[in-house]
Image: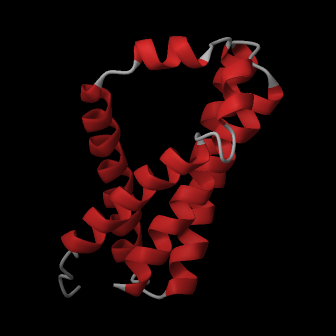
Amino acid sequence: MEPVSMNYLAVLIAGVAYMALGALWYSPILFANAWMKWVGKTKEQVAKDFKPLNLLWILILSLVAAYGIARIMLWAARGSVADGIVIGLLAGVCFVLPSYGVNDISEKRPLGLTVTNILYHIAGFVVMGIIIGVM
């Protein structure tokens, strides 16, 4: 098998895009108010709990996810936008959905919270797959 190199720029851009999608997803424009209700927090509590270091951790974890999508695409020898969509969707449905589902059912979390979180990650995996597929 011929070695294929990882496109680390694509991983970086995909990871940042995943994080940016999260910032939009959990903003007042989309799901912030519902999310706060489901987790039992006010805007003031969320603001008080905010720590800049958390953004660094979110970025690192987003980059890990982007690297995983890129690695799967390399192993599968797939590199188009369509391949990125399929692999991102498959990874989200097969790994995120069961992981959140098991935890949230066990913790008796609100269904809306579970669905919102799962859909964010599935959408994020698809966006990362698209970016990696384009590059």
Q: Is residue 28 above or below residue 49?
A: below
* Colouring: secondary structure
Image coordinates of residue 51 in percent, x first then y, are: 31, 21
Question: Looking at the rendering, which quadrant does residue 60 occupy?
Answer: top left
* As drawn, 82 above or below 51: below
- Looking at this rendering, what residue extends furthest in the front direction? 44
In the image, residue 42 above or below residue 35: above
- Residue in view at x 51 percent, y 76 percent: 84
Give 97 or 124, whichever is nearer the viewer: 124
Horizontal arrangement in the rendering, residue 24 relative to residue 76 (left or right): right
Q: Position of residue 120 (x, y in %)?
A: 61, 48
Quadrant (top left, top right, bottom left, bottom right) of the N terminus: bottom left
Residue 76 shows up from this direction? no
Viewed as shown, does residue 7 lie left or right of 112? Answer: left
Does residue 72 appear to the left or right of 60 in the view shown? Answer: right
Could one spot residue 6 in this view of the protein? yes
Q: Looking at the picture, how far across and down is residue 2, in whole percent? A: 19, 88
Q: Position of residue 111 (x, y in %)?
A: 82, 28
Quarter holding the C terminus is bottom left
Q: Residue at x 46, y 19 (%)?
A: 47
Q: Residue at x 71, y 15 (%)?
A: 106
User: Would you place residue 78 above or below residue 46 in this image?
Assistant: below
What residue is at 68 percent from the left and 49 percent from the top?
119
Quarter holding residue 27: top right
Q: Residue furthest right?
A: 111
